[in-house]
Image (spheres, grey):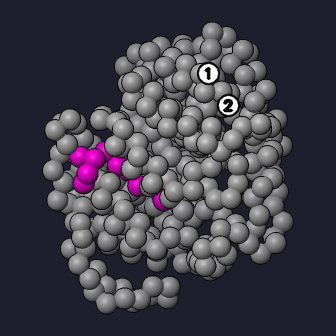
Amino acid sequence: MRVGTFVLGAQFPGQGQGEALHRAVRSAEVAEEAGLDSVWLAEHHFVPYGVCPSAVTLAALLLGRTRRIRVGTAVSVLPTVHPVALGEQSALLHLTSGGRFTLGVGRGGPWVDLEVFGAGLEAYEKDFPESLDLLLRWLREPRVGHEGERFSFREVAVVPRPDELIADPHSPDAAAGPGGASGPEVVIACTSPKSVERAAVRGLPMLLGMHCGDEEKADMVALWRKYALAAGRSREEVDRAAHVSAGVVQIEDGREEAAQTLVKAMPGWLKQGLDAHVTVDGRHRAMRDPVSYTELLCSLHPVGPPRLAADRIAATSERTGITRFALLAEGSGDLAATEENIRRLGAEVLPLLS
């Protein structure tokens, strides 16, 4: 079981953006101190839901400040960047960190980001497979040229080559982790059967959202296996796939106490953050009720005393086959409380999962 923390850089009402980013950095540093496996960094643009606009940039900072923990993006939004640029950045982080970087990518949403960055709606609705395949080629081949509907360029050398990893002497086990010497691990955010198929045929592990319960995640894992085997992936490769389950965590002495901490803080952040999203084409958005959504998350995830939290993580793993977790620990909105939450997760929950 590999348990990590999911960092949004959430800006709660009354807080500044610098405060949110400081809490994000401290969350990662404390996660390493607490013995967690990984930290996963979200990326958003123009909204207080999360004030980190470049997950790979923050990952670079955190890889430099840590020595053991894996750092992943959850996710880098592929339609708003050139896949070769993202591939170069990922190779650089993979090589200089001793293999501790994981690249999570996703399609994002039909947001105004597409207009600002000049990608256009087609980059979201149609071009994601082309961008994903170009990115994967860049991470796997020594030279790459491309002729496609969105990108076209002559063959060029891949520099630096992500398969030329020299393990960091401070992290002797890093190269043996996901990705290893062949290049950085790539995971893909999946929210629909089509995205599950897209991940499966390419043999990419899934990152599954915190709004999903165990039954839905188990169905998505089963569907991934079906598509992967049908695409010719070996049973060994399919069995080895390390999917990631996102969720929230709040460790306190009582179940109601932990839930109340989140119910008091998260709805204000969710309303302010989600309301700020603007669609690129004016389409209608159906928004979740912030209080009901917070209560749903409390019911699905490890919110409560350590024993309950460990049992819930273990139950999700047993029902779904997922062994990696990215748990949002900043739901209180308070720096000291977030740090204490992460420390308790490491000191009081992880030993129960061993």
What distance separates the C-alpha of mark 2 from that of mark 1? 8 Å
Displayed quadrant of residue 186: bottom left
x, y (%) of residue 17?
65, 44
For residue 73, which numbered disc appears in the image? none
Element under label 1? helix
Q: Nearer the viewer, residue 76 or 197?
A: 76
Q: Amino acid at mark 2?
A: Gly
174 to 252, vertically: above or below:
below
Element under label 2? loop
Q: Amino acid at mark 1?
A: Ala
In magenta, the rendered stretch is 95-105
x, y (%) of residue 6?
53, 39
Residue at numbered disc 1: 337
Asked if the residue at tag 1 contacts the one at tag 2, i.e. Cβ–Cβ closer than 8 Å, the answer is: yes
Q: Is residue 148 something one can see in this rendering?
A: yes
Hey, which residue is sitting farthest top in the picture? 253
x, y (%) of residue 307?
54, 13
Displayed quadrant of residue 210: top right
Dot 2: few (<14), some (14–19), or many (≥20) neighbours within 10 Å? many
